[in-house]
């Protein structure tokens, strides 16, 4: 675990309601069963996603996740979809591929893990869903001004 104090930016975001930052649509529980099939054409995508969360953060040890779908509003014309762990505390993250270490809010951690999973899955996904999910989320991120700056270091 990384012993780094929270930045003032992250402190201000931790107690902020999800929908006050950016208009998002959290998928209701009754619709969650088909959500993962929208993200990727791979049967093991969900397992891969949660495995990556464990790999990149020692603070993550399982739990419930919220699923988010934002209608296609970006220039790429694709919806933005991602998942994030439901928790009240940030996660220490470490990306050995780019030497990044830092602390991310649960939402920003989920966005980063979703992007990494989409990228990894795109090499095996014959349906092109993973690639489209990646580009939809990146397109939405490009239009946001209030995402945590550390998120970009994590996914770089």
Image (tube, rainbow, N blue to C red):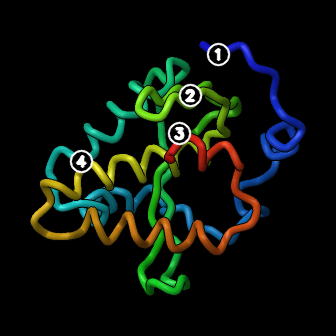
> Which secondary structure lies at badge 4?
helix
Q: Nearer the viewer, residue 140 or 20?
A: 140
Q: Residue at x 44, y 26 (%)?
A: 96
> Which secondary structure lies at badge 2?
strand
Q: Residue at x 58, y 66 (%)?
A: 141
The residue identified by callout 4 is 45
> Which secondary structure lies at badge 1?
loop
The residue identified by callout 3 is 85
Q: Is residue 41 above or below residue 111?
A: below
Label 4: few (<14), some (14–19) or many (≥20) C-alpha neighbours in 10 Å: many
Q: Is residue 105 above or below residue 16?
A: above
Point out the tag, 3 or 1, that comes first from the N-terminus. Answer: 1
The residue identified by callout 1 is 2
Q: Nearer the viewer, residue 35 or 81?
A: 81
Say whether residue 128 is left or right of residue 134: left
Question: For residue 93, which numbered disc appears in the image?
Answer: 2
Point out the tag, 4 or 1, that comes first from the N-terminus. Answer: 1
Circles 1 and 2: CB atoms closer than 8 Å: yes
């Amino acid at each position: 675990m990384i012993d780094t104090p929270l930045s003032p930016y992250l402190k201000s975001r931790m107690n902020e309601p999800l929908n006050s930052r950016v208009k998002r649509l959290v998928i209701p529980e009754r619709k969650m069963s088909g959500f993962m099939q929208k993200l990727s054409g791979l049967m093991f995508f969900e397992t891969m996603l949660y495995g990556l969360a464990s790999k990149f953060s020692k603070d993550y040890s399982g739990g419930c996740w919220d699923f988010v779908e934002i209608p296609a509003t970006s220039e790429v014309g694709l919806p933005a979809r991602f998942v994030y762990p439901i928790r009240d505390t940030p996660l220490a993250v470490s990306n050995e591929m780019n030497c990044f270490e830092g602390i991310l809010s649960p939402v920003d951690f989920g966005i980063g893990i979703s992007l990494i999973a989409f990228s990894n899955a795109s090499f095996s996904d014959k349906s092109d869903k993973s690639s489209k999910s990646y580009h939809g989320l990146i397109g939405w991120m490009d239009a946001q001004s209030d995402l945590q700056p550390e998120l970009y270091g994590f996914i770089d």
